[in-house]
Amino acid sequence: MPEIEKYSEKTFEDIKHINADGIEFWYARELQTVLEYSEWRNFLKVIEKAMIACQGSENTVESHFVDVNKSSPMPNGGERIIDDIQLSRYACYLIVQNGDPRKEVIALGQTYFAVKTRQQELIENYDELSENQKRIAIRNEIIEHNKSLAEAASNAGVVEPKDYAIFQNRGYQGLYGGLGAKEIHARKGLKKSEKILDNMGSTELAANLFRATQTDEKLRRENIQGKQAANQTHYEVGKKVRDTIKELGGTMPEDLPTPEKSVKKLEKEMAKKITKK
């Protein structure tokens, strides 16, 4: 198997297409090659699972999986018509979620498509936002998803506030290489009243958003029960996100710089500008 260093976010960007309306899509056969499936029939089974998941999430399958015909060159000259499928980013996300977890490139694809899909959900022109605008957008998204995470944790048996604090701390420890909330708070040099999530850059916030959303989904999907099991799940998801960052050659979250202004301060400044207009 090729070394993971050969893969990067660019691997999936390289096979992305843009149609005449400016909408991005991927071809299933090209994604098949990148994800190291040698047989089209085997990859079709993964696509079928993704379609079922798409339907289960109350999305229109035909909007995300579009059957097309493509011409393919023959070894001895000429061309033949083959079946293919145009995939949305969400369709690709569902495919890698249902792919072979033993493949390292699948783990990379899960991170790439999950983060990019989440960015699209946040705001369509995410890439055009300034760093401060991204921080505010992601921080607000975390606030909303932490509500869902709290509910999932409660369903698993994490009910008391003290237990939920422990649960949250385990997620941080997995993502931050053993550092809990108090250690992260001290490392950032924050005042007692300041929240660590308000004092993160967009990259660090995105890692924490991914940690929260994937833990939420795993708790619900696997119907995990018991405080210890929930805590371990949060830790393992956090560690998986950390391992993926490492595989991609990224900076560990605890080593990322702390912004000069908190998200709260940025929001206050933005509110003042609006009221002055």
Image (cartoon, rainbow, N blue to C red):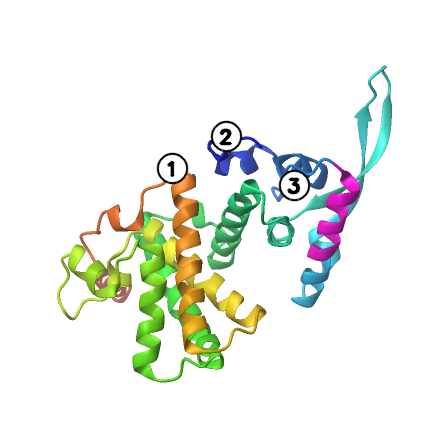
User: What span is in magenta?
Assistant: 39-50
Front residue (pair 93, 227): 227
274 lies left or right of 54: left
Q: Circle 1 sits on which residue?
A: 249
In the image, residue 7 above or below residue 52: above
Where does label 2 land, which residue? 6
Mark 3 or mark 1: name the one nearer the start of the chain. 3
Q: Which mark is residue 31?
A: none
**Which residue lies most toward the bottom here?**
160
Give amino acid for label 3.
Trp
Q: Image check: 250 left or right of 185? A: right
Tag count: 3
Residue 119 appears left or right of 83: left
Q: Of the residues shown, which amino acid type is indicated by label 2?
A: Lys
Residue occupying image coordinates x 25% and y 64%: 181
Residue at horizontal 68%, vertical 61%?
54
* Quarter occupied by residue 196: bottom left
Q: Position of residue 59 (x, y in %)?
A: 67, 63
Image-quadrant location for residue 150: bottom left
Residue at the spot 19% in from the left edge and 67% down from the top edge: 194
Residue named by callout 3: 26
Mark 3, Cα crowd under 10 Å, few <14 / some 14-19 / many 20+, is: many
Q: Residues within 10 Å of mark 1 (few under 14, many from 20)?
A: few
